[in-house]
Image (cartoon, rainbow, N blue to C red):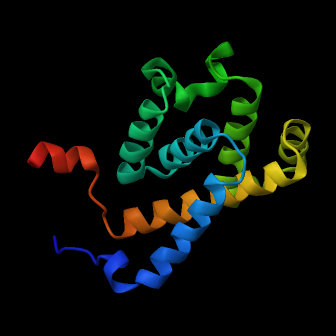
Amino acid sequence: MSERLDYNHIAPAGAKALGGVYGYVMQSGLPATLVTLAYLRVSQINNCAYCLDMHTRDLLKLGVKIEKLALLQAWAEAGALFDERERAALAWAETVTRVAETGVPDEAYQAARKIFGERELVDLTIAISLMNAYNRMSISFRNTPQAAIEKAA
């Protein structure tokens, strides 16, 4: 298998632009744990090993317990482990990520609007969209997960 391109090196302005959106999201006022849970769920749906590794590490650093991370993929069946805002963010992340399948139905929008203010929902959707873009970049160019780098060292 041939090595893939390093998009950060080839298109640094593009990579920096994505980083600018990431910076916007992190200063948006949405809780870092909520956003990062959404990032991890999006990455699970897209099967992005690089992002799965990174966001799992980030959530552990934020103090999220391993049990919660283990059940993220089945959050809807995890009872009170995920609070109301987390459940709403995860449901929204799923329907937006699967837009080609779901069309983001009105019921999903109304459910999210019951929980999130206008700005919060727009910012959350920007975050979800950004992670979908990052997943596509990381998968397309085969970014190596940190865990694999550490194992090789």
Instruction: Provide residue 95's location: percent of width, then percent of height.
Output: 71, 48
Toward the left, the furthest residue is 153
In the picture provided, is 47 more to the left or to the right than 39?
left
Is 33 positioned to the left or the right of 117 in the image? left
Residue 83 in view of the camera: yes
**Relative to 109, residue 133 above or below:** below
Q: Position of residue 104 (x, y in %)?
A: 79, 53
Query: Which residue is rendered at x = 71% and y = 30% of the image?
Result: 87
Position of the N terminus by quadrant: bottom left
What residue lies at 85% left-to-right and 36% top-to-bottom? 115
Q: Please report the residue visible at 56 percent of the width from the left and 60 percent of the height from the top.
A: 132
| Residue 98 seen in the current view | no
Corner quadrant of residue 123: bottom right
Q: Position of residue 125 (x, y in %)?
A: 72, 56
In the rendered picture of this protein, how many numbered marks are placed on residues?
0
Seen in the image, is 17 located left or right of residue 117?
Answer: left
Which residue is rendered at x = 13% and y = 43% of the image?
A: 151
Image coordinates for residue 70, horizontal then vertical, percent? 45, 24
Relative to 4, is 32 on the left or the right?
Answer: right
Q: Which quadrant would residue 94 be assigned to in this image?
A: top right
